[in-house]
Structure formats: C-alpha cells, structure tokens
Image (spheres, rainbow, N blue to C red):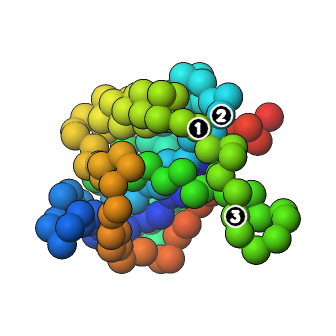
Amino acid sequence: MRLVIQRVSRASVSIGGEIHSAIGRGLMVLVGIADGDTEDDVRWLAAKTAAMRIFPDADGVMNRSLLDTGGDVLAVSQFTLNASTRKGNRPSYIRAAGHDLAIPLYELYCKLMSEAIGKTVATGVFGADMQVELINDGPVTIIIDSRLRE
C-alpha cells in the first residue's frame, strides 16, 4: 500500500464540477492499494500518517504531527500509484488491487484516520472521475510504502 501525503493549506475534490469535499489546513492523502495489501498495512499507515511530524513548531521546525495541530485530512483512493512503468510508455496497473480488496481497505484507512484525529476524514468517491485541487504548504510531500517499512 502506498500513500502520497501532502501538507496543505487547503484541498478539495470536485466531481462533475461540484465540490464533493474540502478541507482546510492538514493533509491531502492519495491512497494506492495493491494486490496483497492487508489490514495490517492499513493500520500501520494510518498510525504513521497521524503521528508524522511534518508541521512546523514555534521555531519553524517540522516537529508537530496532525495529532498536535488538529488538522484535517482529505483521503482519495488512487489506483495509479501502483503503476509500473518498466516496459514501454504505457503504464501498467496490473498490481493495483481490484474493487473487492481496495474499497474495504480504503474505507478502513479513512475510519482509522478519523478515529486517530477525532474528526471525520473528507473523502473522494471510489472509482469516480475526480478533480483534486490543493495548495501544498511548504511544499511538503512524503511517499510511504507499507512494503518498505522494515
């Protein structure tokens, strides 16, 4: 399971020209679920996301977490994070999980993040054609892969 985490001033997801969800200061998280990912991967990544110290303290040092700042989270499922570009010029998505695995794991990630931060996590719509807008604050962008945790 891969996450692209961006510290944002604000972020939103629109579908069909209408804003579906939006957040203020916090984290925009793109969630890529691959075949073979498990609930253990989700639990580890949710805990890591909530506790990651990427917000500035009073001295401007990235020393505060989402838990410390009370920030928001917008989580959007994105199967293209599992693209393989090794051969040719057309990415292959064969490693991306199918709906039967990806939807429950994405929903679990959102649930665990909501529990961790004590507020609802804003989401996109699984499988929808979405337009994502964000203001990356810093810029700060972190990529985490649960298969590379050891």
> Circles 1 and 2: CB distance less than 8 Å?
yes
Q: Which quadrant would residue 117 be assigned to in this image?
A: top left
Q: Nearer the viewer, residue 70 or 114?
A: 114
Instruction: Judge whether residue 52 can be spotted in this image.
Output: no
Helix, strand or loop at disc 2? loop
Q: Which three-letter amino acid code belongs to the residue tagged 1?
A: Ala
- As measured in the structure, the alpha-carbon distance from the residue carrying label 1 to the one carrying label 2 is 4 Å
7 sits left or right of 141 in the view:
left
In the displayed structure, 43 sits above or below 82; it is: above
Secondary structure under badge 3?
A: loop
Residue picked out by circle 2 = 35
- Residue 90: percent from left, percent from top: 71, 69
Residue position marked by numbered label 1 in the rendering: 97
Asked whether, in this view, residue 131 is left or right of residue 146, the answer is left
For the question of whether residue 30 can be seen, the reply is yes
Tell me which label, 2 or 3, sits earlier in the chain.
Answer: 2
Image coordinates for residue 71, horizontal then vertical, percent: 30, 53
- Looking at the image, is mark 3 or mark 1 earlier in the sequence? 3
Find residue 91 and name its label. 3
Q: Nearer the viewer, residue 86 or 118?
A: 86
Label 1, secondary structure: give it. loop
Image location of residue 82, percent across then percent down? 65, 52
Dots 2, 3 in contact, CB < 8 A:
no
Q: Amino acid at mark 3?
A: Pro
